[in-house]
Amino acid sequence: MKKLIVFACLLFAVAACQKEEKPMSSPADRKKAKTEAKATPAKTSKKSDANAEAKRIYKLNCVVCHGIKGDMGASGAHDLTKSELSLKERITVITNGRKTMTPFKDVLTKDQIKSVAKYVETLRTE
């Protein structure tokens, strides 16, 4: 019972840390977002704009399991602060999923996946 209460508190804490934007829950929402992303690509002229977009995508789709800092580990998620995967390997994992991780190939564009994979590298602690 105590574990359930602690888990519920953690869920509320994560929800409180998020902005008004919510993760896309239905396949229709995901398809719509992917279509909009293709129609209006994110600004990539400045590195900070690309990082901000990658961080936004990470917050919308990854925070629930990996946490803001990448070390939450909910639902068996790997600790991204200790990840030793190459950029190519991270792109593959994000695209196709791994173990309990959902694949994002139908949710995000290839460019969005690549930008999130690059952003995840900034979460590493050595």
Image (tube, rainbow, N blue to C red):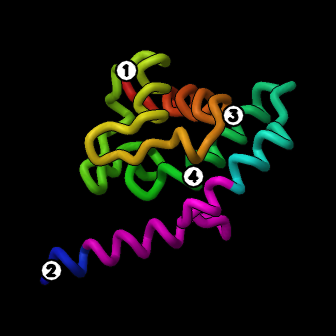
Q: Which residue is pictured at 34% across the width and 20% down the height?
A: 84
Per the rendering, the mark at residue 16 is none
Q: Residues within 10 Å of mark 3 (few under 14, many from 20)?
A: some
Magenta region: 7-31
Q: Is residue 7 left or right of residue 36?
A: left
Mark 2 or mark 3, earlier in chain:
2
Main secondary structure found in the magenta portion: helix
Identify the residue position indicated by label 2 in the image.
2
The residue labelled by disc 4 is 59
Asked if labels 2 and 4 touch by Cβ distance under 8 angstroms, the answer is no
Residue reaching furthest to the left: 1
Real-space CA distance between mark 2 and mark 1, rounded to the nearest whole angstrom: 35 Å
Q: Describe the element under mark 2 as helix, strand or loop.
A: helix
Circle on res. 51: 3
Identified by mark 4, the residue type is Lys
Disc number at residue 85? 1
Instruction: Give the quarter of the figure containing the N terminus.
Output: bottom left
